[in-house]
Image (cartoon, grey):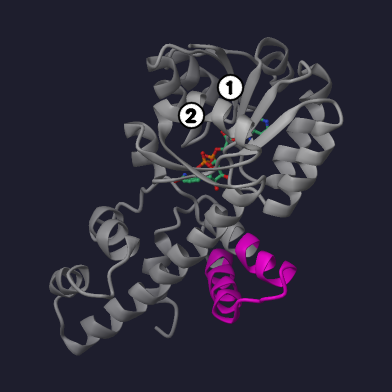
Amino acid sequence: GAVTVGFIGLGNMGVPMVTNLVAAGHTVVASDLSPDARARAAAAGASAVETAREVAARSGVVILMLPDSNIVAAVVGDIASLLAPDSLVIDMSSSEPLRTRALAAQLAETGIRLVDAPVSGGVVGAVKGSLTIMVGGEPADVDEAAAVLAPMGRVVRVGGIGAGHAIKALNNLLSATHLWITAEAMEVGERFGLDPATMLEVFNSSSGRSGSTENKYPNFIFPGTFDSGFGLRLMLKDMRIAVQLGEQVGRPSVLGADAVGLWAKAADDLEPTADHTRIAEWVRTAEGG
Ligand code: NAD
């Protein structure tokens, strides 16, 4: 049945996710540091409050959709004493898997349960309620979370605590690496005299296809809008999480480490708020240009 759901982090993803929770009949108590973000959540039908502590005091299930593990740890530290024992915290941010495990162990001392439930599908998927939600945790907790998560997308049970965050980071390492090499291939082809739309058509019916050729190029890069709603800095964070995970498990990713270096160099040149799809333009104009 419908429960009161707390939601902290009302950015590009959080607001449309809240909209779908409200549409499914949940009472949502939401907060963000930004007053503008709180106003958007209120317009979506949530009860917007100023602080995360007010959210925690009013909800038995609290969803986090924050930038990274540092902020998740700070917010959880702030609200933990206000959460009822047996509360369920669902971290939908793209966080660091080993820190997620540590946080779960820490919360368990006071009976609070944590599951990780990061998503893919971007802002479009958040709006449509068609996200892929990769959920890690104790099976009973995952079942409880799944009922709340359903209006936002398709729940995939991926393993124990931290499994969702690991698979999310690895997915984005692939996605970011695909985007870079796609931009290089497109640039080489164009200089040879190939038509970009023709290249894309062939890649998309061949083995070179990816989320970059099927989605990012046609929707955000060719139109020149660069408005996917996923920031370059957030993508770089995810790549670093995946590469660090490789080190942590004793299997460093060679190409992954190179991709992080390349993206980091581009990030130095681009606006801090740039969309991650700007990388394609940067590769074209700066890298080797
Ligand atoms: P965003 O930057 O648009 O939103 C983050 C929000 O968190 C902002 O509104 C910010 O004000 C708020 N915030 C920051 N610190 C806070 C604090 N201490 N207390 C309360 N609020 C705070 O980011 P986003 O694009 O919505 O992404 C959120 C998470 O989801 C990230 O981990 C990101 O990597 C991941 N993600 C994003 C996408 C996407 O397409 N945008 C897709 C999948 C996953």
Question: Which residue is at a point 43% across and 16% down the rendered structure image?
Answer: 22
Q: Secondary structure at mark 1?
A: helix
Question: Which residue is at a point 40% across and 70% down the rendered structure image?
Answer: 178
124 displayed left or right of 194: right
Instruction: Where is residue 216? Give x, y as percent.
Output: 31, 58
Between the C-alphas of marks 1 and 2, the distance is 25 Å
Q: Amino acid at mark 2?
A: Leu
Question: Which residue is at a point 41% across and 22% down the rendered structure image?
Answer: 19
Within the image, what quadrant is residue 276 found in? bottom left
283 displayed left or right of 166: left
Q: What is the quadrant of the C terminus in the image? A: bottom left
Q: Secondary structure at mark 2?
A: helix
Q: Which residues are magenta?
A: 241-268
In the picture, the disc for residue 149 is 2
Within the image, what quadrant is residue 278 found in? bottom left
Q: Earlier in the sequence, mark 1 or mark 2?
A: 1
Q: Please identify, in this view, whether the residue under mark 1 or under mark 2 is nearer the observer.
A: 2
Circles 1 and 2 in contact, beta carbons < 8 Å = no
In the picture, the disc for residue 7 is none
Question: Which residue is at a point 61% across and 36% down the rendered structure image?
Answer: 139
Tag 1 residue: 35
Cβ at disc 2 under 8 Å from ligand 1: no
Please state the quadrant of the image where ligand 1 appears.
top right
Q: Between residue 36 and residue 162, name the one nearer to us.
A: 162
